[in-house]
Image (tube, rainbow, N blue to C red):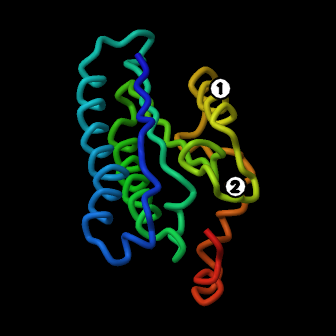
Amino acid sequence: ETAVLAFGVLGDQALAERDEAEVSRILHTDFVAQASLLTVLADVMRGRPATDRRRGSIVAFSSVAGVRVRRANYVYGSAKAGLDGFASGLADALHGSGVDLVIARPGFVIGRMTRGMKPAVFSSTADQVADAVVSRLRNGGAPVLWIPWQLRAMFSIAPVIPRAAWRRMPR
């Protein structure tokens, strides 16, 4: 009834700037593999019998890093931007089908992938992210889930920040 795509890599940005294999690894894991799996899951769920007009839910983990890509992690951010765009289009395609696609957009998540990094403003733990997703699945809501919710306001101004200032933003 519910499928959660919970895999990805941050990758090594410095290595990716000189090694196309690292770029491919990051893009494949964080975009291509996820878009492929989302396609399969959406097809399978569309074919499920409806229960109260619902056929199931899919959760795709995007990131605020894909909302406006930053210099400090542009390979990871561009993969998430691609995934975010793909998932947004797929959510529109699934509209009315009984399949609910939730696009989770967490900010910095304190956990294994970010071990050793200084937490950013509005950081979350994996448990907080999981709780937010479970709440959204139980109670419904918008297709895009900002975790924490404050990031929605923060990233609503990101597109209007001048490029020269954005370029200097830390991770």
Residue at the far front: name it.
116
Above or below: residue 77 compared with residue 63? below
Q: 55 or 65: which is nearer to us?
A: 65
Neighbour class for label 1 at 10 Å: few (<14), some, many (≥20)? Answer: few
Q: Quadrant of the N terminus?
A: top left
Label 1 vs 2, first from the N-terminus: 1
Residue that badge 1 annotates? 135
User: Where residue 31 appears, x then y in whole percent?
Assistant: 33, 52
User: Where residue 43 appears, x then y in whole percent?
Assistant: 24, 30
Residue at image coords 28%, 37%: 37
Residue that badge 2 annotates? 151
Query: Judging from the image, what secondary structure is the residue with disc 1 in?
Result: helix
Observer able to see residue 96:
yes
Side of 57 relative to 117 (left or right):
left
Above or below: residue 129 compared with residue 69? above
Residue type, label 2: Leu
Query: Judging from the image, what secondary structure is the residue with disc 2 in?
Result: helix
